[in-house]
Every structure is written in structure tokens, then in C-alpha cells.
């Protein structure tokens, strides 16, 4: 039987981060290994081997392996299109060509805008003779023989993946199921995705696109996960291998490869969970996460320590409507290039110096200034990074920035500080997408900064948005792997069920109960014990006549707004929460004045996994660190100031730090500006807050 | 407080741009009218304290009506509102467009304005949807509101709200729309206030000047040099005013000099009895100049670059207009109906593109007609109005760099209604949702295809159609051919009734079918120059028929092979023969219906005006 050593692995573009918790002692182990672009499973296994060695453990000690992967995302980004076919209801062959008849952005763009190629070219789309009505009634019976003939033709033309999206299949999946069964027996090697399985939700174009993205990534995900599974099995016996989903929960590798569209945000989800874990320890509940990497920044908003999901994600122009973390990505990171834009403006990103050549100061051939170069010139970064492994060429960065500033008539300091200001504004835009755009004022949230470059700009981002507190967790470069440690098994279920909220709700109860049965059965099937299963109901509602729904989940928060005080899991509770959420999102609501319409019913099945905190306490007897050295650091508001430099590894619990100062650690640098102060909590979290009057 | 430098300018410009997106998102998420929410028929703008437009994604309305009616009676907490085409400085074309404006302050100092105007479902009048076809004056079109305050210093004007709501057949939609617009404006105004706090009012206002000056400079430096100086004329037509079916011409003369463009509308036909007039001769034509200016972006070096160029108040420094005396389609007398002015509004873009095609040797996109409204309305058993109404796009234009996109809509981010939504909400069944084969104008770069849609009505109802380009075709450019026009028919058992583009209240019984075809875009360039493989792929996909490949493109398709293929020898022969036996290619092709009308003397030019179509294609373009 398995042991109690939990291993989590986060595969990134450059490094694969591995973290392990020994449940018996509470010890935490961390290792890094280079990622393997060609076969990520090699790095995965190398990582496991490494951490077992460093902890002195063997495969039999492992309880679970939890994995965050970018395989699905990479398949989409690398445009692995060819060989996808589509089956649709008769009369709808042009569904992808027509899409939503939209032209993006500005007025008059229809003159010059060119529609990008569709996911499936028209000659690989076939119509199916059948028709179902919106209430699920069969209007025309399905004719399967011609489907088989058509698909045989598609396979002949090189199709290896097929999406099936029949009209109103969310209301009655029978025809799609029959097609799925027929294809499985006739074409066993074909990858098939059914829209009624992937996303049983109305709006045919979006459902078709989500289904096709699922079909598109399926061969890659299945191949990768099954290869990894096999290699793990060769070393040990049926160890649980769990995959992070875009919804912030995990499922087994087998379930993930059946519906891989749910893996698109597998990578960033771990970071958000890690941020929640750190914030929970530090006593914060409402957070905005700021995950800054080399080329981009991911931000997400967390209310009351729970992840916010959205079903409106767009990836590479493709609407993908399965529930995912509500995440915004902006093209500003540590390696983003500064350049001169039109109108003589100073621009930063989205082009990045990448890992090669990297910033000028890395001395690997970079010639254009980056955010990192600006930080180095201003003294924000030390003269070497990654524990001394990477020496920084400050003079080269300074020379380049002098040149860059001259074009604007700016001093080298003003140019460098300007680059940081513009980079900050870019990250602010990202935060507005998940906060003000969703009716949340960021001012009341705690900013959790992580990733290699997150702690560099966090306080300026906070000032921009009137955010009062910034939290930098320990090992901010490795937070995603930590987040994978604290996840639950989560599966989402949805069914479109359109009706006005009037009179009794027996039918609604029946649908919810059905989804709950399905969720319970799936989780039991995945080995979750019955007493560890939680079922959260949700609903998508709108005022009669609105075209878009507001999703509410009846978790702990919703209970408090139930007027009758009873139950709290019924339609009445959902409607009360809907009015409140509508008010938060849009600034108005019509309780008692306008009819409410139900559109979708949801259930999230959660399997709680047993775990202790992955954040160890700091040694209680450590003395406050006096600061390792001092260095001149430039601030836009104050000019050059002498600042204390601290080594984070030596900071003690409850230690207080007055800004301006800099805290350095392996893989990240925390900047505390004038007017700010920091405190270290018992877990080593660094909490920064305004110390001046503002 | 900092002064304006490159950093402040970048952050302020970026924040204004993202504020525009935030306002749009806020409108769209909470608005109630499908016209706003799905069809995205609304405009968002941020303006400075002088009423100059700062944002560029959308053409916007104007602020001048506030100055005209309220002077400096502008305070924090005010919300201005109007929909009056004759009392809005030419900024409001028809009365379903309700315009909401919020002034932005830092302390007591006016910084600017946030504005949203959107096409609401219903504001009264004789036909549901407030776009009656047969109406002789504005009073028959619905409730007209001159500039008023809906909120004064934060206090709601409940009287005005009650009147507005009472006059709409869909009062809940109307109220939801207005509330969403006000909320969105307030959200956007906070961004400008925050910028003032961070960088100071002086830096902010300096940035406003720079943003506007940048627009003029970009047009002057990048776009104007591509237009040959000279005087050029062009014209295009609306087919009917709802009462009389004849060609109503809009005419322009463009005078291009080194750093300016003047557009003179003199020669435009007399105002119409029905609702196709467009009152734009106010306030130095500021509105129409901002509306037509974006067409110039087609001359950018690439479509990607074109998309980056924001057209804001800076266009006024480059583009001038001149209007004829009162009493024409673009200078109607007070109170003439304007509900269906969107035909002439689209024609305005087309004729500007036409003169530019002449002045650039054919390097402009062809014509495309991308807005028409049709619908079915009825009373449900409970007496409530059911109004199913769609704004359907059409084929985009062929252009030097690409084929036209299929079924696009000129309104950015406009969305059609999903069949699964329509069938849940309305008593209809969508039987076919397709592209219409051969509807794109042939050309080296083919015009985009229009819709081929078939709807079955499930209860007795009345049909409306507000469509132009049902006789005339979107024109082809530089040797490209015209696209196919719009059509709408009702099938009752074995009877098929073909309807004109502009009708109201046509009875449709339960189980009758409505067939719709929307227009294809005009083609660009000589169809005989189109790559045979591209024609063959179009045939494989069912976008072009084997016959049209032969007769329009001179491409012989061998259907016996699998997949189908081009018969190279026969194609070469046929194309040589076709080239030899035809006349020189004209710059414009307006299709067969137009040639017939012209031949029958249906076109009368004003004195001093000659046929603007006398112009040859440019083989070297």
C-alpha cells in the first residue's frame, strides 16, 4: 500500500518544479529540473526521482502524484489543427464559417479585417439527418448509416479527430450518444468528442467550438498522460496520478484524458491555489493574485478564499466555455522589451527577450532593454541572481538604458523608472479585467505577488489601485507546485434547463438531484470515499429578456442571504444570491420587480483530499536578521536612497522591516519602497503595507 | 504633480483605451435589448472638457448638444439624455438611438465626459421596434426627447423615467438598457478622475491634446500620401423610401489636396417622403466627418496596421465637409422621418470608398452591405409582445489583400442570435443557417458570401423587413463584379411571395416559411486573374458552383476526379478566349439591375454632373 509522501509537479516553459510533503513529519522538499519540450514526461519522472533522492524516499513511499501541465495549452497555441472533422445537424453546415458574424474592435474594420481560418475547413464538415427541438423532443429521427459513410470519407481524407455538435443536444443527448457509439465501434482509432458530454449548454456555435477544442487537444493529452502513467506504473503499483484542471480541482489522469478541454489552465491554476494557501495562513480572505513570469502576467481574483470560475474564457480566439478560473493574462513580464511606440510613447511588451537571449544584464547576447534591466539599473536587483548562479552585467544594462532614454530626452534613471511605471500600468490593466470589469473594487483586496518577477512591481501595482496590503509568500518562484498540494478533486456538471422562476420547482430539484447522483458516482469511481464528497449546487440566472446569465454557486456564502432561512440549497436561495450578485456586477438589480429566468443548473462535486498544510512554520527561536548590506536604490519619487538589503532566508517570524529596503532570496527579489513597511508572519509570508498617511 | 512625458502619455493613452473597453463590457453585460447586447449596436466614447473625442474604437455621438442646451449648467452627478435627430447637433441619426452622457469631474473641475448611445428595442411609434417603413414625419416614429437631465446632481428625474417607460412597448428592456448605460458611463468616468489624481490635470489635458494631434498626424503622414491630389466624384443610391421605389442618389465630390480632404455632398437628391433621410448638416458636420473618416484606414500598409489607427477628434483637422442647401437627403427639413437612415449612412462609407478607389488606382475594398433588420412580431396568449428581430450581416468586400469575409456585420463585435436561443425564446424554428452559394461578387479577390436562412413560424404573426440593396448589388471594384443582392420571400404551402426589401406588417401564418438571402460583397480585381486552385477550393467547399467557376472565373472544374480538380488546359484556353472577347474592364460594376435601370433612362443626373462610373480599372493595382 502507498505511503504518505505527496509529490506535486508543475511543468513550466523552462523548469519543472517539484515539491513534496512528508505527511508523517510535515517536512517539505523542493527541487527543480529543466523541462523537456519534446517529451515532458521525461522531466516529470526525472523530477520525481530527484525529489525521492533528496528526501531519502522510494517510490513505495509515495501516496499521490499531483501534476499541473501545459500540454493542452501548447497544443492549442501550436495550432495543431489539421485532421479535425465536424458533424452537425442538417441545415447547419456553415456554423463555423458564420460563427457569430462578428468583426472585432473598431468601426469600419469590416472593410479590411480578414476572418482567420476556421478550426475545421468547410470540406471536412458533414451534416447529419436528424433534428431535436429545444425541449428535447425528437422532430426528425437520426439516420446513422449516412453518418458512418460520411465519417469513412473524412477518415479517408486524413481526419483523425471528430467533433459532434447537434442542435439542442444539451436538451436530449440521445442522437449524439448513438453517433458516438456507432463511431467507437466502426472507427476505434478515431478521437471523438460529443458536445453533450463536453458542454451540455445552449448556444450552438460556442458549444461546437468548445467540443472541437476538446477534440483538437485529445490525442496530445491522452498520449502524454498515458505515457506518464505507464512510466509511473513501471516503477510502482497503481499509485494515484492526479491532474490539475482549469477549475482548480484535480481528477485522475484517465478522466482528464477523456475530457482534456478542462486542462487548458492546468498550469496557472496551481499558482492561484498556492496563493490562497499562503493568504489563508496569513489571515487574508479576499485576494488578487499577481503571477509574473518572464513574458507575461496572470492575474485572478479570489473572494473569501474560493476560486472564481467563469465560462467565458477565450483562448486564441476560440471560445471555450467549460468552467475555468477567471484569469486574465497581460503581456508584461520580467523579460518584456521596452521600445519606442508611435507618438513618441514609451512602450513595454508584449514582445519579450525570452529565456534566450534574455535581458541585456544576463550577458547572453540581449541588446534591447527589458523590465529586468531597468530594475537592475535602479538597484532593485542584486548583482547576481539565483543564489549567485547568474552574474548580472549592470554596466551593459546601464549603457543601453542611457541610449534608450536619450531618444526621449530622459536621464537613465527616469527612463528605467519609466519602464517600471509602464510595466506596472500593464499589470493594472490585467487586474481591472478581473476586478472592476466584474464589479469588484480592487481596493479592498490583498495583492498576492509571486512568480520570479511578481514581488518586483507589486507595491507600485498596489499604489495604482489603492490596494493597502501586499503578500509575498515564501519561495514565490515555486508557488504553483505548492498549490498543487492543497487541491481537492473537483468535477463540474451543467445542464441547460430554461424556465421562468415561478411556482413550484420540483423539476429543478430533479435535475439538480440527477447531476448530484452523476457527480457522486464519478467521484466514488475515482476512489474518493463517500464521506469526503461534497456537492455544491449552482445556477445560471438572468432577468427575463437578458441575453447573458449570472452564475451563482450555493456555497457557504449564499446561505446567509437566504430570506426564509430554510434549506439554502434550493432555487429560492439561488435567486436571492442572483439579485445580490447582479447588484455587485452591474450596480443594479430588480428583486421583486422583474421576472427571473433560469438557464443552466450546475453541480460541482468535490472530493476532499486529506492533507496537512504545505507551508511549514519558521523556526520560532530565530533572531531578527540585521540586514546583510546596504545598496543605493533609485525611486521615482525620492531619487537615490541608501537601502538595507536583507536575505530572506534569515528573516525571523514577526520581524519588522521599514521601507525603503530590499529582500533577496533564491529566484526572486522583494522591493519595499519608501512609505511602505513589511512584517514576517509565522510561516515566513512577507506582508507589506502602507506606513505613510495614504 | 508630474508634467507630460512619454511615460505619462503612454499610461494615460493606455488607460483611456482600456476604459473604453471597460465601458463597453459593462453595457453589454447588463443591457436588455438584443439590439445592444447581441447586435452590439451601441457606441462608447470618452471626451475631454471641450467635448473633443479621445477614444477611437467607435465613432460616437457628440457633446455639443449639452453645451447648446445647458451651457455651463453641468455638475457632478448629472446624467444627460436625448434621442432627437434634429436637436442633437446631427449626432443622433434616428430615435431608437438613446444617448446617455455623464460629465467627469475632479473635485469641482470638469475633466471630460463619458458617453454611451445604443439602439434600444422600442421607443413607441406605429410599429414594434420603432422603425416604421411607411411614416411621413418624425412624430409617427415614436417618442422624441431633446437633451434633458435624467439625473441632476445625483437626483433621479423620476418624471422623465416614467414618461420614457410608458412610451415603450418593452418598458423593462428600456429601463434595463438606460440603467446599464448610466452605470457604464460612471465606471468609465472613474478612470479619468483617477488619472487626474495620479498625474495632475495639466498632464492629463496635455495628453488629450497629444492623443488628438497624433490622430491627425498619422492620417497626414501614413494615409494621405497614398491618394492622388485632384477632384473626384462618385454616387450611390437607396432603392426605396417605403412609399416610392426609385433610386435616391447620394453624391459626393472629393477635393484632395496635399494635407486635406474636402467632401462636398452637393448634387445629392431631394429629401424623401419616407424615413430614409439623415440630418447631418449641423455643427460643421462633425458627426459625419467622424463617421466617414475610418474608411481612410483601408489605405494603411496592412490590415493589422489599419486596425491600430484610432480615429478620434483629430480627423476633423484633416477632413472637411460641405453640404447643399436645406431639403436634400442629407439636409432634411426639421421633422422629416429618419428611422431607416442606416442605408444612407452605409452609402456614405461606400461613396467615400468609391472616390478613394478612383484616386488610388483601385486600391480600395469593394462595397458591402452589412446591416439589415428583419423580424416577426405577434402577441402571445397573455397579450405580451413577442418581437423576434435580427440584424443580419452580409458578405464583406473583396480587397487587394484578401477575399471578403463571409457574413460580417459592420458594427464591431455584433453577434447574431444563436438558433438555440431563438427557438427557446420565440415561436420559430430555424431550418437552415447557411452561406449563400455564388453570392460573393467574383473577382481576383472574391466578395464574401451572404446568408441563406430559412425560418418556420410556429404561430400567426406579422413580418417586417428593413433592407436596402434588395434590387441593387454591392458594387465590385477594379474589375471585380458586384455581389448578389438581398431577398426575402414567404412560402405559404406551394405559394411563394417575394417581398420588397422594405415592408411592414406582412401576415405570416403558423407553419409558413420565411426565406432570406443577404447580400454578398463586391469582388475586387479581374476574376480571370483569380488563382484556379482558389476557385477549385471554393467549389469543393460549396461556396462557388461549378457553373459560376466556368462563367465568372473561366475555370473548368473536373468533377470526375476525387477530390475535384482544375482542368488546366481547358481553363487556360477558356480564359484566353474570354479575355479577347470582352471590353476594357471598368473600375466599378454595379450589377445587372443597375445596368437595366440605366439603360431604361432611370438615372437622371443633376446639372453639371456626369456619369461617375466612366472610369477604367487599373490593371497594375
Image: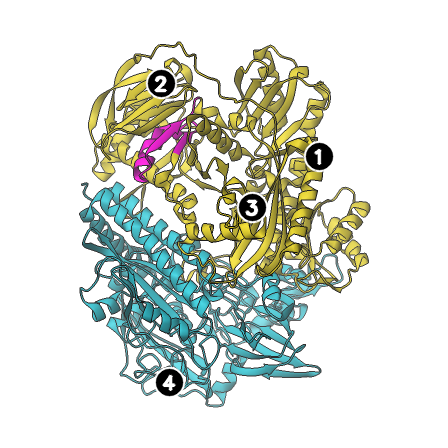
Chain colours: A yellow, B cyan
Where residue B454 appears, as percent x and y from the top left, is: 63, 71
Residue at 47%, 53% (x, y): give it: A579
Separation of disc 1 and disc 3 at Cα? 25 Å
As helix, strand or loop, the secondary structure at mark 3 comes to loop
Residue at 49%, 44% (x, y): give it: A560
Dot 1 or dot 3: first in sequence order is 1
Instruction: Based on the picture, tell me whether residue A607 belongs to the magenta stretch.
Output: no
Determine crowd level at label 2: few under 14, some 14-19, many 20+ residues with C-alpha closer than 10 A: some
For discs 4 and 2, the disc positioned in front in the rendered view: 2
Determine crowd level at label 1: few under 14, some 14-19, many 20+ residues with C-alpha closer than 10 A: some
Front-lying residue, B536 or B521: B521
Determine crowd level at label 3: few under 14, some 14-19, many 20+ residues with C-alpha closer than 10 A: many
Separation of disc 4 and disc 2 at Cα? 77 Å
Q: Which residue is mark 3?
A: A568
Mark number displayed over residue B193:
none
For discs 4 and 1, the disc positioned in front in the rendered view: 1
Dot 1 or dot 2: first in sequence order is 1
Residue at 21%, 25% (x, y): give it: A640
For discs 3 and 4, the disc positioned in front in the rendered view: 3
Question: Could you tell me which chain the residue with mark 1 belongs to?
Answer: A
Residue at 60%, 47% (x, y): give it: A602
Q: Which residue is mark 4?
A: B137
Question: Could you tell me which chain the residue with mark 3 belongs to?
Answer: A
Q: Which residue is mark 1?
A: A524
Q: Compared with residue B311, is residue B331 higher up or lower down, i.e. above or below?
A: below
Tell me whether the residue at label 4 lies in contact with that at label 1, contact meaning CB atoms closer than 8 angstroms: no
Amino acid at each position: 500500500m502507498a505511503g504518505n509522501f505527496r509529490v506535486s509537479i508543475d511543468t513550466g516553459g523552462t523548469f519543472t518544479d517539484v515539491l513534496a510533503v512528508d505527511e508523517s513529519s510535515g517536512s517539505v522538499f523542493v527541487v527543480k529540473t529543466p523541462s523537456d519540450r519534446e517529451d515532458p514526461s521525461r522531466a516529470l519522472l526525472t523530477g520525481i526521482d530527484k525529489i525521492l533522492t533528496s528526501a531519502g524516499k522510494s517510490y513505495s513511499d509515495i501516496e499521490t502524484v499531483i501534476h499541473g501541465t501545459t500540454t493542452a495549452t501548447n497544443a492549442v497555441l501550436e495550432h495543431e489543427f489539421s485532421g479535425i472533422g465536424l458533424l452537425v445537424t442538417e441545415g447547419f453546415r456553415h456554423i463555423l464559417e458564420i460563427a457569430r458574424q462578428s468583426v472585432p474592435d473598431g468601426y469600419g474594420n469590416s472593410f479590411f479585417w480578414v476572418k482567420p481560418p476556421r478550426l475545421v475547413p468547410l470540406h471536412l464538415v458533414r451534416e447529419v439527418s436528424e433534428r431535436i427541438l429545444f425541449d428535447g423532443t425528437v422532430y426528425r429521427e437520426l439516420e446513422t448509416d449516412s453518418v458512418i459513410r460520411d465519417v469513412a470519407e473524412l477518415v479517408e481524407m486524413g481526419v483523425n479527430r471528430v467533433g459532434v455538435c447537434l442542435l439542442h443536444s444539451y436538451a436530449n443527448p440521445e442522437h449524439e450518444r448513438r453517433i458516438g457509439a456507432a463511431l467507437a465501434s466502426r472507427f476505434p482509432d478515431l478521437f471523438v468528442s460529443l458536445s453533450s458530454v463536453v458542454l451540455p449548454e445552449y448556444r450552438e456555435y460556442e458549444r461546437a467550438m468548445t467540443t472541437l477544442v476538446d477534440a483538437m487537444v485529445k490525442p496530445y493529452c491522452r498520449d502524454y498522460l498515458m505515457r506518464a502513467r505507464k512510466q509511473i506504473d513501471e516503477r510502482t503499483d497503481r499509485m494515484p496520478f492526479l491532474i490539475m484542471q482549469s477549475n482548480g480541482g484535480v481528477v485522475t489522469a484517465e478522466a482528464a484524458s477523456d475530457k482534456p478541454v478542462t486542462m487548458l489552465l492546468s498550469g496557472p491554476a496551481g499558482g492561484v491555489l498556492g496563493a490562497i494557501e499562503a493568504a489563508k495562513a496569513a489571515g487574508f480572505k479576499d485576494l488578487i493574485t499577481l503571477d509574473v513570469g518572464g513574458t507575461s502576467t496572470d492575474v485572478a481574483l479570489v473572494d473569501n478564499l474560493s476560486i472564481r470560475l467563469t465560462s467565458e474564457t477565450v483562448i486564441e480566439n476560440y471560445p471555450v466555455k467549460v468552467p475555468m478560473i477567471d484569469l486574465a493574462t497581460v503581456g508584461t513580464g520580467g523579460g518584456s522589451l521596452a521600445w519606442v511606440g508611435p507618438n513618441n510613447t514609451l512602450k513595454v511588451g508584449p514582445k519579450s527577450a525570452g529565456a534566450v537571449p534574455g535581458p541585456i544584464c544576463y550577458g547572453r547576447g540581449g541588446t534591447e532593454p527589458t523590465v529586468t534591466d531597468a530594475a537592475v539599473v535602479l538597484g532593485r536587483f542584486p548583482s547576481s541572481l539565483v543564489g549567485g548562479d547568474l552574474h548580472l552585467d549592470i554596466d551593459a544594462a546601464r549603457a543601453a538604458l542611457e541610449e534608450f532614454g536619450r531618444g526621449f530626452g530622459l536621464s537613465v534613471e527616469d527612463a528605467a523608472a519609466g519602464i517600471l511605471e509602464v510595466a506596472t500600468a500593464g499589470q493594472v490593466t490585467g487586474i481591472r479585467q478581473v476586478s472592476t470589469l466584474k464589479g469588484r473594487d480592487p481596493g479592498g483586496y490583498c495583492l498576492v505577488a509571486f512568480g520570479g518577477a511578481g514581488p518586483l512591481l507589486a507595491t507600485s501595482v498596489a499604489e495604482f489601485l489603492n490596494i493597502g496590503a501586499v503578500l509575498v509568500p515564501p519561495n514565490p518562484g515555486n508557488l504553483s507546485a505548492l498549490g498543487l498540494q492543497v487541491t481537492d478533486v473537483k468535477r463540474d456538471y451543467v445542464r441547460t434547463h430554461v424556465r421562468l422562476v415561478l411556482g413550484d420547482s420540483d423539476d429543478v430539484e430533479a435535475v439538480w438531484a440527477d447531476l448530484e447522483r452523476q457527480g457522486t458516482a464519478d467521484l466514488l469511481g475515482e476512489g474518493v470515499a463517500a464521506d469526503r464528497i461534497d456537492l455544491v449546487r449552482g445556477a445560471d440566472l438572468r432577468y427575463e429578456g437578458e441575453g447573458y446569465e449570472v452564475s451563482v454557486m450555493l456555497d457557504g456564502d449564499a446561505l446567509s442571504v437566504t430570506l426564509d432561512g430554510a434549506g439554502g440549497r434550493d432555487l429560492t436561495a439561488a435567486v436571492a444570491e442572483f439579485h445580490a450578485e447582479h447588484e455587485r456586477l452591474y450596480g443594479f438589480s430588480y428583486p421583486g420587480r422583474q421576472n427571473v429566468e433560469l438557464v443552466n443548473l450546475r453541480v460541482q462535486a468535490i472530493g476532499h483530499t486529506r492533507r496537512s498544510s504545505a507551508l511549514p512554520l519558521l523556526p520560532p527561536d530565530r533572531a531578527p536578521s540585521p540586514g546583510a548590506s546596504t545598496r543605493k536604490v533609485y525611486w521615482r519619487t525620492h531619487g537615490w536612497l541608501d537601502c538595507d538589503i536583507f536575505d530572506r532566508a534569515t528573516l525571523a517570524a514577526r520581524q519588522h522591516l521599514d521601507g525603503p529596503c530590499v529582500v533577496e532570496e533564491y529566484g526572486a527579489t522583494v522591493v519595499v519602497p519608501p512609505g511602505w513597511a513589511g512584517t514576517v508572519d509565522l510561516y515566513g509570508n512577507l506582508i507589506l503595507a502602507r506606513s505613510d498617511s495614504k | 504633480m508630474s508634467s507630460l512625458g512619454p511615460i505619462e502619455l503612454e499610461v494615460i493613452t493606455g488607460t483611456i483605451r482600456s476604459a473604453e473597453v471597460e465601458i463597453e463590457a459593462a453595457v453589454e453585460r447588463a443591457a436588455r435589448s438584443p439590439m445592444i447586447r447581441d447586435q452590439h449596436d451601441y457606441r462608447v466614447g470618452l471626451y475631454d472638457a471641450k467635448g473633443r473625442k479621445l477614444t477611437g474604437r467607435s465613432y460616437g455621438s457628440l457633446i455639443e448638444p449639452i453645451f447648446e442646451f445647458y451651457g455651463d449648467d453641468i455638475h457632478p452627478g448629472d446624467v444627460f439624455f436625448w434621442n432627437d435627430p434634429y436637436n442633437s447637433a446631427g449626432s443622433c441619426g434616428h430615435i431608437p438611438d438613446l444617448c446617455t452622457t455623464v460629465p467627469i469631474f475632479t473635485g469641482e473641475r470638469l475633466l471630460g465626459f463619458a458617453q454611451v448611445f445604443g439602439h434600444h428595442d422600442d421607443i413607441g411609434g406605429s410599429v414594434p421596434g420603432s422603425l416604421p417603413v411607411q411614416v411621413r414625419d418624425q412624430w409617427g416614429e415614436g417618442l422624441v426627447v431633446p437633451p434633458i437631465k435624467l439625473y441632476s446632481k445625483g437626483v433621479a428625474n423620476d418624471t422623465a423615467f416614467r414618461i420614457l417607460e410608458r412610451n415603450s412597448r418593452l418598458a423593462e428592456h428600456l429601463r434595463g438598457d438606460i440603467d446599464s448605460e448610466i452605470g457604464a458611463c460612471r465606471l468609465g468616468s472613474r478612470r479619468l478622475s483617477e488619472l487626474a489624481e495620479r498625474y495632475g490635470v495639466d498632464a492629463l489635458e496635455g495628453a488629450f491634446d497629444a492623443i488628438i494631434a497624433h490622430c491627425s498626424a498619422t492620417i497626414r503622414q501614413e494615409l494621405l500620401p497614398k491618394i492622388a491630389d485632384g477632384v473626384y466624384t462618385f454616387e450611390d443610391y437607396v432603392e426605396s423610401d417605403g412609399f416610392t421605389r426609385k433610386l435616391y442618389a447620394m453624391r459626393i465630390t472629393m477635393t484632395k489636396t496635399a494635407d486635406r480632404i474636402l467632401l462636398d455632398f452637393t448634387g445629392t437628391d431631394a429629401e424623401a417622403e419616407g424615413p430614409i433621410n439623415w440630418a447631418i448638416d449641423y455643427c460643421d458636420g462633425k458627426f459625419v466627418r467622424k463617421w466617414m473618416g475610418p474608411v481612410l484606414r483601408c489605405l494603411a500598409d496592412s490590415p493589422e496596421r489599419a486596425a491600430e489607427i484610432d480615429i478620434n477628434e483629430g480627423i476633423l483637422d484633416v477632413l472637411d465637409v460641405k453640404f447643399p442647401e436645406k431639403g436634400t437627403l442629407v439636409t432634411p427639413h426639421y421633422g422629416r422621418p429618419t428611422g431607416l437612415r442606416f442605408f444612407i449612412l452605409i452609402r456614405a462609407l461606400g461613396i467615400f470608398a468609391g472616390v478613394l478607389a478612383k484616386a488610388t488606382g483601385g486600391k480600395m475594398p469593394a462595397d458591402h452591405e452589412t446591416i439589415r433588420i428583419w423580424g416577426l412580431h405577434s402577441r402571445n396568449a397573455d397579450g405580451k409582445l413577442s418581437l423576434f428581430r435580427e440584424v443580419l450581416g452580409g458578405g464583406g468586400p473583396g480587397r487587394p489583400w484578401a477575399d471578403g469575409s463571409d457574413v460580417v456585420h459592420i458594427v464591431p463585435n455584433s453577434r447574431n442570435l444563436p438558433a438555440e436561443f431563438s427557438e427557446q425564446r420565440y415561436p420559430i424554428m430555424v431550418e437552415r443557417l447557411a452561406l449563400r452559394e455564388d453570392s460573393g461578387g467574383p473577382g481576383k479577390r472574391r466578395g464574401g458570401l451572404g446568408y441563406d436562412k430559412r425560418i418556420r413560424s410556429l404561430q400567426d404573426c406579422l413580418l417586417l423587413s428593413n433592407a436596402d440593396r434588395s434590387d441593387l448589388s454591392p458594387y465590385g471594384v477594379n474589375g471585380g463584379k458586384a455581389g448578389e443582392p438581398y431577398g426575402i420571400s414567404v412560402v405559404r404551402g406551394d405559394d411563394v411571395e417575394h417581398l420588397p426589401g422594405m415592408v411592414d406588417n406582412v401576415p405570416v401564418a403558423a407553419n409558413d416559411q420565411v426565406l432570406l438571402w443577404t447580400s454578398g460583397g463586391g469582388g475586387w480585381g479581374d476574376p480571370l486573374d483569380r488563382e484556379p486552385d482558389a476557385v477549385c477550393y471554393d467549389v469543393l467547399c460549396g461556396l462557388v458552383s461549378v457553373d459560376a467557376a466556368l462563367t465568372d472565373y473561366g475555370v473548368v472544374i473536373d468533377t470526375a476526379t476525387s477530390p475535384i480538380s482544375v482542368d488546366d488546359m481547358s481553363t487556360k484556353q477558356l480564359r484566353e478566349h474570354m479575355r479577347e472577347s470582352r471590353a476594357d474592364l471598368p473600375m466599378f460594376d454595379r450589377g445587372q439591375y443597375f445596368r437595366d435601370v440605366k439603360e431604361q433612362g432611370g438615372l437622371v443626373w443633376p446639372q453639371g454632373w456626369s456619369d461617375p462610373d466612366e472610369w477604367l480599372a487599373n490593371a497594375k493595382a
